[in-house]
Image (tube, rainbow, N blue to C red):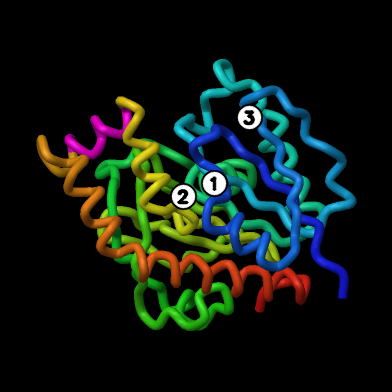
Amino acid sequence: MPSPRVLVFQHVSYCPLETFGACLAGDGIDPVIVELDKGQAIPDLDPFDVLIVLGGPMDVWETESHPWLIPEKDAVRHWVATLDRPMLGICLGHQLLADALGGEVSRSQTPEAGVSDILLSETGRKHPLMQGFGQSKQAINFHGCEVTRLPAGGVNLASTVDCVNGAFSAGSAAFGIQYHAEATDTLVNEWFEHEAARALAEQLHGPDGVTHVRQRVVGAMPDLKRNAERLYRNFMRIAANGRGP
């Protein structure tokens, strides 16, 4: 069976595929990465089998400062609502999926920064995307906005204590995860080179927030890496089958 043709929408250099990139390379898959923030155009979607939409610091409504968000949302909508092909949206990608399909994204009442317990819903515990995770898993969250209303037909798969829609499904095989399953401790350190990330960590965890988050991430990294690889395998197995349950 030929390898799936994977298209990736990237929004900033410091939110790359990271762990998922290593997984793709291990499978001999060379994805086409569109760097939207650098002005790269979205290609014809028809030749591709899988879409991955990554994270970023911008918000879904910031179309004046990031005008490429408009064609990106159009592409996501076409991919899911018309082509009905497998998609995984991560953090901003999760929010773009919801927004593009008619859901709602708003400022979080309680933002998140650090290692979170991802609590699977009853549906999530039975869903092939979450196969092998039991009732919960660990992952890195780093966001100030969240999906506050799922699009029509969207199904909640997971939450955290502070974020109801931590993961959801749409269409036959499109998924959004608010958390950064792909992130590593190296990547988190790169995030902390930016003032906004440091400020969020200090807002939530006090003056030593950056150190707190770094220590938690390093301590949890073996588990986080295993969880990322499992999620990748689950998603790619769904993609190979062409649809979800």
Q: Residue at x 67, y 26 (%)?
A: 68
Picture quarter containing residue 116? bottom left
Q: Nearer the viewer, residue 30 or 41?
A: 30
* Span colored in magenta: 196-203
Furthest residue toward left: 207
**Which disc is residue 103 wearing?**
1
Furthest residue toward top: 64
Q: Residue at x 58, y 34 (%)?
A: 11
**Which disc is residue 69 wearing?**
3
How far is the residue under mark 2 from the one under mark 3? Answer: 20 Å
Label 1 sits on what residue type?
Answer: Gly
Label 3 sits on what residue type?
Answer: Leu
How far is the residue under mark 2 from the one under mark 1? Answer: 5 Å
Q: Which of labels 2 and 3 is toward the front? A: 3
> Which residue is denoted by mark 2 in the rendering?
149
Q: Is residue 207 left or right of residue 32?
A: left
- Is disc 3 placed on a helix, strand or loop? helix
**Residue 38 placed where, x, y %?**
65, 24
